[in-house]
Amino acid sequence: MPGHPSRGRSSRLGAAGDGDRRPAPDRRLVPLHDRGRRVSRPRWAVVVVNFRSSALLSENFGFTADLPADAVTVVVDNSADEAELRTLHRVADRRGWTIVTSAGNPGFGAAVNLGAATAFSLGCEALLLVNPDVRLDAGTAQALVGTCLDDVGAMAAPLIRDSTGAVTFRGSEVSMRDGRIRGLGPVVITADGPAPGVARLPAGSERWLTGACLAVHRDLFTRIGGFDPGYFMYWEDVDFSVRAARAGATLALRLDLEVVHDEGGTQRRPRAGRGKSGLYYFYNARNRLRFAARLVPRGQRRDWVLGTPAVSWEIYRRGGRRQLLQAPMSLVHLVRGAATGLLALAPRRVGRRSA
């Protein structure tokens, strides 16, 4: 996700400094441990990606005990940490969750795909993706999933507030002209366009729903190929939403349903003045341009390239004014991310065949 308040994920900070030189994820991801409760045929699953967040899961996911018997919880662990995994197993044993481990940390999208594959193998028809630092109740979870069970071409997200009560997500749009992200007022979009009486999408923009709390039907998820694992973190839900909408999906914002989410709950809190993590800057700058390379027609990418300095600086300013003095390497991460993204947009040269 592009640094929107509704989502926060953590990873190893060194990955940002190395850019795309992190080890490639092991594609042979397999379930390591399964102590989940068994039902004759689960109908839907809560899927959560864990990165050293077992304490948050223990605190926030008590609602899973109140879910109906046809719901299961699948936790995909990206921690690559034995102590964390032992703690996670203790929580899972009490709650009846299924644990799946990835090889190392392949990123959020790859982990969601692994959790989805596990849920579908159990017979689930729909998924509810939830961040570890999101707080919700069982009724809200059921209502979100119900949207997708009633309409297999739908995906649904709730209104999101932080712990102070302030609204942090009620729909967002991405400008296809320059890649800027903007929040929207209350909206519901269908395959036929905005519903009557709600704000219309700005010209040249496409709507997206946050992956912090998102329900999606199996048919839609598999039809569009799941999440793109190449983003690693940030912007993958923008990519997923746009691909789904272009495939004719309904993107529904359930204003009658609310959850609580405090930004960055799964991340280490930076010291005052040090801004956000290097990962945040690198992947937000890089993935904006990766998105353009994947989903913006070649003839429309010029403004994305020309706007990169200004948009990258806007991303950097989210960390506050003092970070340039107190954490100067953060700017290096930002520049490196933008440069890596620009390379993804560069035309591929085809060598001439030898005579």
Image (cartoon, rainbow, N blue to C red):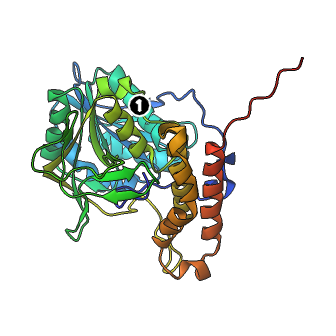
Task: Relative to 4, say whether 188 is above or below.
Answer: above
| Side of 6 where 333 appears, left or right | right
Q: Residue farthest to the front?
A: 299
Question: In the picture, which quadrant includes the C terminus?
Answer: top right
Task: Relative to 223, say whether 138 is above or below.
Answer: below
Task: Relative to 242, say whether 151 is above or below.
Answer: above
Residue 84: % across, % down: 48, 50
Viewer-closest of 255 and 142: 255
Residue 189: % across, % down: 21, 42
| Side of 332 where 35 appears, left or right | left
Label 1 sits on residue = 226
Q: Quadrant of residue 133?
A: bottom left
- State whether residue 196 appears in this view: yes
Residue in the image at 35% along x and 40% along y: 241
- State whether residue 231 appears in this view: no
Q: Amino acid at mark 1?
A: Gly
Viewer-closest of 164 and 29: 164
| Side of 116 where 199 appears, left or right | left
Residue in the image at 36% along x and 48% along y: 204
Residue in the image at 39% along x and 52% along y: 175
Viewer-closest of 299 and 346: 299
Crowd rating for badge 1 (residues with CA inside 10 Å; few <14, some 14–19, many 20+): many
Residue 291: % across, % down: 50, 44
Q: Quadrant of residue 353?
A: top right
